[in-house]
Amino acid sequence: MTITPTDFRKDLFNLLDMILESGKTLEINRNGHIFKVIPPKKTNKLDRLIAHKDAVVGDSDDFISMDWSNEWQASI
C-alpha cells in the first residue's frame, strides 16, 4: 500500500496498527521518494488467533450421537 505523507499523518495510529496486524509494509511517497514502514517481524495469521475458552474441543461427529431431547422444545 502506498500513501502520501498527509494521509499517513491523518491516520497514523490506525495505519501503524494495520501494519502490525497484517505484517505488510506501508510505503509513503513524498515527491517521488519512497519511505517504507516495515513491521518488526513477519507475523503468521495463526499467531494472531485468540483462544476461546468456551469453544468445543473434540470431534464434531460426537454431536451426531448425542441425545438432545432434553434441550429441544417444539414450537407451538
Image: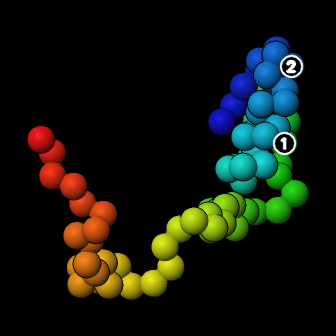
* Colour basis: rainbow
Q: Quadrant of the C terminus?
A: top left
Estimate how packed mark 2 is, as few (under 14), some (14 to 19) or many (20 or more) residues with alpha carbons within 10 Å: few
Q: Quadrant of residue 15?
A: top right
Q: Position of residue 74 (x, y in %)?
A: 15, 52
Left or right of 40 in this view: 7 = left
Disc 2 marks a residue whose amino acid type is: Arg
- Looking at the picture, which amino acid does disc 1 mark? Val
Q: Please count the marks in the image.
A: 2
Which label's residue is closer to the chain start, 1 or 2?
2
**Residue depicted at x 68% and y 50%:** 22
The vertical placement of 16 against 3, above or below, is: below
Residue 11 image point, x, y percent: 79, 22
Question: Which residue is at a point 45% across and 84% down the rendered structure image?
Answer: 58
Other-residue count near label 1 (Cα within 10 Å), few / some / many at <14 / 14–19 / ≥20? few
- Compute the Cα span from label 1 to label 2: 13 Å
74 shown above or below 44: above
Residue assigned mark 2: 9
Residue 1 position (above or below residue 31): below
Residue placed most toward the observer, 63 or 14: 63
Check whether the beta carbons of the residues at disc 1 and disc 2 lie within 8 A of each other: no
Q: SS for tag 2?
A: helix
Image location of residue 16, percent across then percent down: 82, 38
Res. 32 in view: no
Give the label on residue 57, or none: none
Q: Quadrant of residue 28?
A: top right
User: Nearest the camera: 53 or 71?
Assistant: 71
Instruction: Kindly identify which residue carries mark 1.
Output: 37
